Image (cartoon, rainbow, N blue to C red):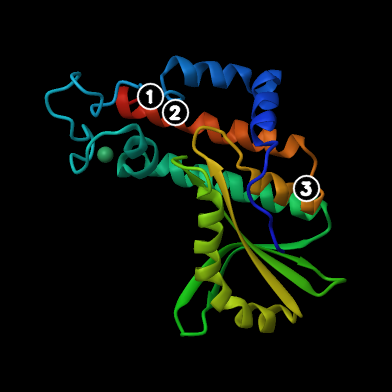
Amino acid sequence: MEQKGGGGGEEEEERRRRRSGVVRHSYSYIHQQGIENNVSAVRAIPGTFQDNHCRRCLSEIETLGHVLGACPYGETLHIHRHHAIRTKLADALRKLKYTVYEEVHGTAENGSNRRIDIIGISESLSQGMIIDPTISFETYKGQSEDLHEEKRAIYVPTIPYYKDKYQLHDISVTGLMFGTRGTIPNFSSQFRKALGLHKSFLNELALLIIREPVKRLRNHLYGL
Ligand SMILES: [Zn+2]
């Protein structure tokens, strides 16, 4: 499926989500903990700690990005969230009558093994779509489009394998980014619309996503 990136609407969508009662509570917590404005009590904040290396893994500077994205200390929560997002996406596709397989091992054209997160198959059209949801710390505009291209580079070489495995005419690859702090890039909104998924789907997903950094930051700072 071809995606169009960029364009407006993203901020409006974001404002609407903030206003909706469903996520307001989690947003206020995120704000309170300084996650939103990147002022949490992590050690990279100048003048707060003598040693600004990560208090858990000791290997990197303890930035919020490190705590929420890279620190091995929070990995279990991270993996759990990734599975939750994948399952939610897969279930939504099943409701739309796609046949869905999760975590399928395949082979790329060069013989290397690559596991895909989700493949949704429209039996009537004999078409498949490989979807790779990724939750990333938002750092720049256009990040979701770059991520999509990265994922295409990884998974397009597996298309012949999956075409053969599931007897399909055509397979698309989509890398879907969701922001660590609950933002849904425009690119992902477009994908949601193209599939015909209900708007509330992204709200639910955002809620699922923003609960994790709250847990992860608490766990990191206070070792809960
Ligand atoms: Zn660390």
Q: Amino acid at mark 3?
A: Lys
Q: Residues within 10 Å of mark 3 (few under 14, many from 20)?
A: few
The quarter of the image that holds ligand 1 is: top left
Query: Which residue does the numbered mark 3 point to in the structure image?
Result: 193
Whole-percent x and y of residue 99?
Answer: 77, 64
- Rounded to the nearest whole Å, what is the CA distance between mark 3 and mark 1? 35 Å
| Pick the front one: 76 or 14 | 14
Q: Residues within 10 Å of mark 1 (few under 14, many from 20)?
A: few
| Pick the front one: 220 or 10 | 10
Q: Is residue 44 left or right of residue 104?
A: left
For discs 3 and 2, the disc positioned in front in the rendered view: 3
Residue 58 to residue 207: above or below: below
* Element class at badge 2: helix
Q: Is residue 199 left or right of residue 45?
A: right
The tag on residue 218 is 1
Query: Which residue does the numbered mark 2 point to in the structure image?
Result: 215
The residue at the point 41 percent across, 20 percent down is 34
For discs 3 and 1, the disc positioned in front in the rendered view: 3
The residue at the point 68 percent across, 22 percent down is 22
Q: Amino acid at mark 1?
A: Arg
- Residue at the extreme left: 50
**Quadrant of image for the N terminus:** bottom right
Residue 190 to residue 167: above or below: above
* Element class at badge 3: helix
Check if mark 1's residue and mark 2's residue have beta carbons within 8 Å: yes
Q: Earlier in the sequence, mark 3 or mark 2?
A: 3
| Pick the front one: 79 or 51 | 51
Q: Amino acid at mark 2?
A: Lys
- Residue at the extreme right: 124
Name which quarter of the figure residue 131 lies in: bottom right
